[in-house]
Each structure stands twice: as C-alpha cells, then as structure tokens.
Amino acid sequence: MKLTILRGELNEAIQHVSKAVASRTTIPILSGIKIDASYSGVTLTASDTDISIQSFIPLETPNKTVATVSRTGSVVLAAKFFVEIVKKLPHEEVHLEVGDRFQTLITSGATEIQLVGLDPEEFPVLPSVQEDQVVSIAGDLLRDMIRQTVFAVTTNESTPILTGVLWNLQEGTYKFVATDRHRLASRSASVAATDVRFSNIVISGKTLNELAKIVPDQNVMVDIVVADNQVLFKLGNVLFFSRMLDGTYPDTSKIIPQQFKTELVINTKALSDAIDRAYLLSREEKTNIVRLVTMEDGGIEISSSSSELGKVTEQLGVTEMKGEPLRIAFNSKYMLDVLKVIDSEELLIGFNGAMSPIIIRPNDHDRSLHLILPYRTTN
C-alpha cells in the first residue's frame, strides 16, 4: 500500500473511528485501526465487537484532491500511537507506505515514523446488515433524544438490559426509554417513515454516548437500519454499527401515574439553581437528599442539611400550584440530571404523596417525561 493523503481529512476520520477501538482487550488486532486504500478512496475501520465504526475518505471533493493512491492495500496500525502521531504531524500532506511484514512508513515534511503494522486479514469482518427497515431522523433531534434519556441508564452490570436505552418505533413515533429502577427518562418524536416498525431494541448507553459525539452539528439526516441483532447508523461517509443488548426490557408504562394529588408549575432555571445550591450540602452528607415542602402562601421551600456544615433553605415562587399540601425528599443529583436536559422554560411536576413517584415534564409539550422515586425519611 502506498498513498498520499491530507492530514486534516485523515485526522477527522481517525477521530471518528477511534471511538470504537477496544481499550482493554486480549486480542491485539482490536486495539488497532484498519486502513484500506483503493482507487475509489481510503477506508478506516475500528471495532471492539460491540460497536464498529467505518469512515470513508473519497479521493477528491468538489474543491480539492484529498488523497492519491499509488498502490492499493491494507494494514492495521496500533490506534494508541497512530491517533496521536497524525495529530502532531508537521505538514499538511501525509505519506503512508506499507512494506514487508506490514512495516509502515509515515512521512510528513521532514518527519519520518516507522510503525509495526498488523495483518489486516485478522481484523474482524464488519456485520452484514440487510437494509430492509430504514428510517431517517434529523441528526440534531437524534442527539437531543440521546442526551435527554441516556443519563438514566444503570451502571450496574448485574442487570445488563438496563445499561441500555429502549427504542421503539410505532406508527411514525420514535420513543426512547431509560431507567435504572430509581428514575426513568423518556423522549418521543415523530418521524416520516410510518411504514417502518420495531420494538424492544435496546442499545448500550455507552454506545449511544459515542454515537452522539460523531453526529454532525449541522442539520443532516441520519439513516438508521435495523437488522437481526445489529443497528447501523449511516452518517454521510461514516458507518456506525452497534450490537443490540440481549433480553427483554421491562414494561415501565404501568409505573407512570396519570393523575396527581399535587401539581406545580415552576420556572426551570429557578428550580435548577435552587436545587444546585442545596445539592452542595447534601453531597457533603453523601446522601444527596433534598427536601421540598409546599408553603401556605403558594410557594415551595427547598432545603438540605449537613451534620458537619449546616443547612440550606430557600423559598421559591411558583407559576401555579394545586392540590394537597406536600412534604417530600428526593435525590438532588437525579433531579439536577433531569433539569439539565429539559428544553422548556417551565416545568410541570406531579406528586401523589411522599412515597409515590415524582413526574417531571415540560409545561409546553408532552414529548419528554421524567420520573424520580422519592426517599423515605424520618422527618
């Protein structure tokens, strides 16, 4: 293999695929990035068997020549060094030449680097995905849906299915759900493909965080292909393959109350700021417990305490409140996680007493819903 390529385009492709490189593996080939050079372009691939990412670099764009391939071929280079080396090369043009036993020479300006390459034949073959069910979604919407749900997945590997986000598509409505049994986040959106349906697709939260990083900022469409046990995301010249998690996701619909004994509408930022201040003390106590009490004048009181540091108390006005008086305690970290991703100025919060789930949703739409279980406290 022998080629010349622009450093910027090569580095961008490396940054995409490196997110799939296995960080801890007993299989050396999985710690590398595979480079394929053909007369149509240069393809970079990385895989940790759970996710695989492939990025294609065309030889030319409408404005410039990106790469010139003198001799086709393939090699696998250790990602740990290759990623850092390319970023630090001094010249815009990079020359790669693979010799005997996959010894690879990288030159840029006056810099010359030799890397030990691995046999590309040992690299895993990308999953085969039949494109029978394809749905398109705007990249910024996909990123928002991930951001507004993925934080609620569990980190406890003893329940693997809950480390992922549940995806359903029915009658043109996409719905994401995540829960760790203490909280729940859901987000829905309408999509154009009303003829495509799927259910019980669960994708690892870690995988979705990596996917969100490479979804372009500009408003581009992402094609999603669902196959037997794989989901393929097509983002322009980047292919992102993800294995689905095995198992059946629990039915969470029955735990969401439809009516409330106490409801309040409140400014999102004001509540977030107040709970953030209360969180400082609750964090020191290592409980994260914050209390909310409704006031007779129609406002609420937020408080937290630390046996060593003291107490924080703050009263907030609300836009609207109705129903029974309430005194409740909850995990302030969980509440802050919700308030960070709510995209509306005002929230509607519903309560059914001190020991029933707290429901939080935007006041101006019903596309997202969050649930937090309260704490049982002695006072």
Image: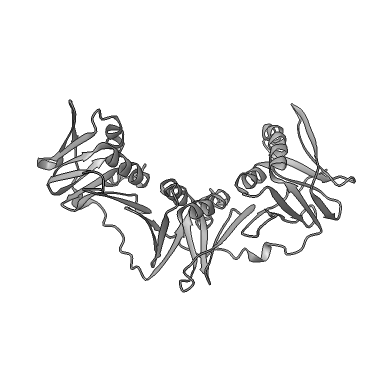
Q: Residue furthest bottom?
A: 195
Q: Position of residue 66 (x, y in %)?
A: 23, 43
> Could you tell whether 322 is left or right of 124 in the image?
right
Q: Position of residue 319 (x, y in %)?
A: 79, 48
Q: Residue at x 80, y 34 (%)?
A: 313
Quarter in which the N terminus is drawn: top left
Q: Residue at x 79, y 36 (%)?
A: 314
> Could you tell whether 106 is left or right of 267 in the image?
left
Give the color scheme: rainbow, by chain, secondary structure or one colour. one colour
Q: How many marks?
A: 0
Q: Position of residue 47 (x, y in %)?
A: 32, 50
In front of the other: 60 or 348? 60
> Could you tell whether 364 is left or right of 222 in the image?
right
* Residue 22 visible here: no
Q: Residue at x 72, y 63 (%)?
A: 257
Q: Position of residue 125 (x, y in %)?
A: 26, 57
Q: Quadrant of residue 185?
A: bottom right
* Residue 219 visible here: yes
> Could you tell whether 363 is left or right of 82 in the image?
right
Residue 169, relative to residue 47: is it above or below?
below
Q: Residue furthest right?
A: 296
